[in-house]
Image: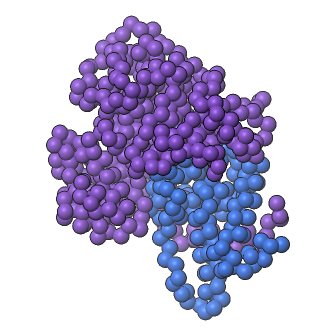
Chain colours: A purple, B blue
Amino acid sequence: MSPIDPTVETALRRALAEHAAQVPPPLDTYRGMQHRATRMRRRRTGMLSVATVAVVAAAAVGVPLGLSGHDHDSITPRQSGVPTAPSVAAPTATPSSTPPSTPSSTPPSAPADALDWAFRGDGAVRSTLLADAQATFADAHPGFTLAPLWAGTTPQGGWSGLIFRATAAGQDARLGVWIAQADGSAGSLVRDDVLEAGTTEIDQQLPADPSNALVVLGAPDTKQIGYAPTVDGNFQSQRVTDGVAVFGLDASGVGNGVAYVELHDTSGTLTYRASLSAGGFLAGENVPPTSVRELVMNGLLQAWLADDRAAAAKYATAEAVQQMFAIPRSLHYVGGDCTDGATPATCYPNGRDISTQPGLLVTMDGGASAGYQVTKVTMGSE
Amino acid sequence: MDTKAQEQFREFVAGRSPALLRTAYLLTGSHPDAEDLLQTALAKTYLRYDRIRDKGALESYVRRAMVTTQTSFWRRRARGREFATDQVPDRPPPGGEDAAETTAIRDAMWRSLGRLGARQRAVLVLRYYEDLSEAETADILGVAPGTVKSQAARALATLRADADLAVDFPLTAQGATS
């Protein structure tokens, strides 16, 4: 590699300093942070109620562990009834049909640690991807040995992925994910985290055209894997034979909200449950798109960002669509919450506390059974 | 978190937020995203405050949370590969030709930064704005110092080769061919 041109470094330092100097002081970061922390806490609390939402309510004790750097919020599994597994990828019943949890005498299970997992998946894909993944990873972490955990393609076959464990004497084990086109070209290392001891679930989103996919790896004895795009959404559950499930996602699949994954072992014992935050998914086909306020908000948001008024009309009145599309699409809005319980509901697509800074404010009427509809969109502060 | 700890954290936020926000802005490229990133990182730190033994390392903890959040695959996917900016280009600056050229170079550099991947961009921000050493940068990113070195070299090479800078910044083009 040629020596670095010092003029580039000088210009870079100047550009960074000058742009940084233009940043106005924050208004009330502490208050905004407190709101954010409250929402994070609420999400965790909300997850505790997932057991009454999930159809695959299950028994016993599990090992909820998140992966480093992946924004998992784990919860403590509780004792509940033994699940009845639905057919592969079939939509399950609505949250209200979930029977209450009941104690079980099933002994606690101990899923195998990811540090001990053997390879699962498509050996041919592994062969196609491994050499490139190894070369790139060695550049970042010399001396590590790669052990593929899973390889496969997305449901439409557009992309392939390799999830691997990397180890080296005296160093923390690492988890890597390599994705590439189906023929192995255009590969890139999209994940490189510490693989903590005790990890019993690994999930990874794979891009695909026209849709996205979520790969969930559980311990090898995992027999059922559930996925729900929001706390209020239905779980899609797959019976699995090797502890791996691949969920196809909606084409616009990378949106907002919080997704949930849970795993059950052979006895039906819940062994893992976690939220996948920081960019969940829009509703899949199995989730009525207007029954959840956040999905309505995000449906409208995505339609707006795509300049698709017809799509926006599915979620909002004509007047609200007009209001929304009168706002310049110059900012990136992700995440966001709605107020609890009240109707009309107030939602914040930008996920920020608009009492301290301007943002989008979405108001909607309706209910979960009849569906929600956005009736007003404004831009401003409270 | 007890009252005393809360007050300590509030003082930390009040004192360090302006500087942290500037770093967040350089990582994200837009004011709303920077506010969003900073608040998220602070909230994560706040929720783990009791478990952070070295309170003197709070700022480093927040900075690490910002970088991790910004470079996480999920977040990048959620935001796409676009680089949001609320800078308005092509506005002739006051101050004559030299000032115009300086501004053009700066803006070209800024646009080129926006085309880098999140991790490479973070490396440059930490190394050339925060003036952190390779080892300190590696610690925040959770990678080996050698990785920081190679990522920085690649990122700078990308900047040198960027068409925008080749046009707006002749010195860069010369450097690229040397």
Task: Locate residue A9 relative to residue B1 in the image: left or right.
Answer: right
Say if B25 sits above or below A183 in the image: below
Say if A271 sits above or below A122 in the image: above
| Quadrant of the snapshot with the C terminus of chain A | bottom left
Q: Residue furthest top?
A: A105
Could you tell me how many numbered marks the image carries?
Answer: 0
Residue pictured at 37% horizontal, 39% vertical: A229
| In the foreground, A15 or A280 | A280
Residue pictured at 62% horizontal, 61% vertical: B116
The answer, for residue B53, to whether it is visible in the render is no
| In the foreground, B45 or B14 | B45
Quadrant hosting residue B97: bottom right
Residue A166 in picture, x, y percent from top left: 70, 33
Task: Locate residue B149 relative to residue A265 in the image: left or right.
Answer: right
Residue A129 in picture, x, y percent from top left: 66, 40
| Quadrant of the snapshot with the N terminus of chain A | bottom right
Say if B170 sits above or below A182 in the image: below
Residue A26 in picture, x, y percent from top left: 46, 62
Quadrant hosting residue B173: bottom right
Task: Locate residue B56 relative to residue A349 in the image: left or right.
Answer: right
Residue A83 in picture, x, y percent from top left: 35, 17
The answer, for residue A210, to whether it is visible in the render is yes
Residue pictured at 77% horizontal, 49% vertical: B146
